[in-house]
Amino acid sequence: MYTSTFTFAKGEFDDEFHALDNVIAQLAKSIPGYLGEESWENPATGLVSNVYYWKTMEALQELIGHPAHIAAKQRQALWLKGYQVVIAQVVRSYGDGGIPHPLAGETRSVPCVR
């Protein structure tokens, strides 16, 4: 499993941004291997962090290579004041089941080096 974390500083969002953002969100959800997402905002810095969960790297790459995603990446400077993307492999995920989470119920685990 993989995560793609998109952290950004908000800029000015116009109608084009919202339309493209909606297209990308719907596209991601339609890709087999998309597991879900979470979003966080840090009130102290104003930064927003969106974490997307993927069953395979191929599923993630399908989104990355889509023309709508490429268009958004090319135009990001119009809407954002900066961003950082981190793509990581999930080594382990677990919890007590007390909160909903996109990886709840996913059983694949990669051995950790301790």
Image: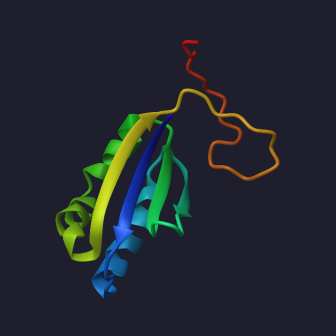
- In which image quadrant can residue 75 be found? bottom left
- In which image quadrant can residue 112 be found? top right
- The image shows residue 35 at horizontal and vertical percentages of 55, 47
In this rendering, is residue 20 above or below 63? below
- The image shows residue 41 at horizontal and vertical percentages of 52, 65
Residue at figure coordinates x 50%, y 34% from the top left: 1
Which residue occupies the foreground of this view, 84 or 67? 84
- In which image quadrant can residue 60 be found? top left
Which residue occupies the foreground of this view, 92 or 16? 92
Left or right, 10 with respect to 111, comes to left
Q: Is residue 6 visible?
A: yes
In the current view of this chain or complex, which residue is farthest to the bottom?
Answer: 15
Q: Is residue 63 visible?
A: no
- The image shows residue 52 at horizontal and vertical percentages of 48, 51
In this rendering, is residue 108 above or below 103? above
Left or right, 52 with respect to 12, comes to right
Residue at figure coordinates x 43%, y 65% from the top left: 47
Which residue occupies the foreground of this view, 89 or 61? 89
- The image shows residue 100 at horizontal and vertical percentages of 73, 53
Left or right, 15 with respect to 40, comes to left
Residue at figure coordinates x 45%, y 70% from the top left: 46
Quadrant the C terminus occupies: top right
Left or right, 1 with respect to 70, comes to right
Residue at figure coordinates x 54%, y 27% from the top left: 91
In the current view of this chain or complex, which residue is farthest to the left?
Answer: 74
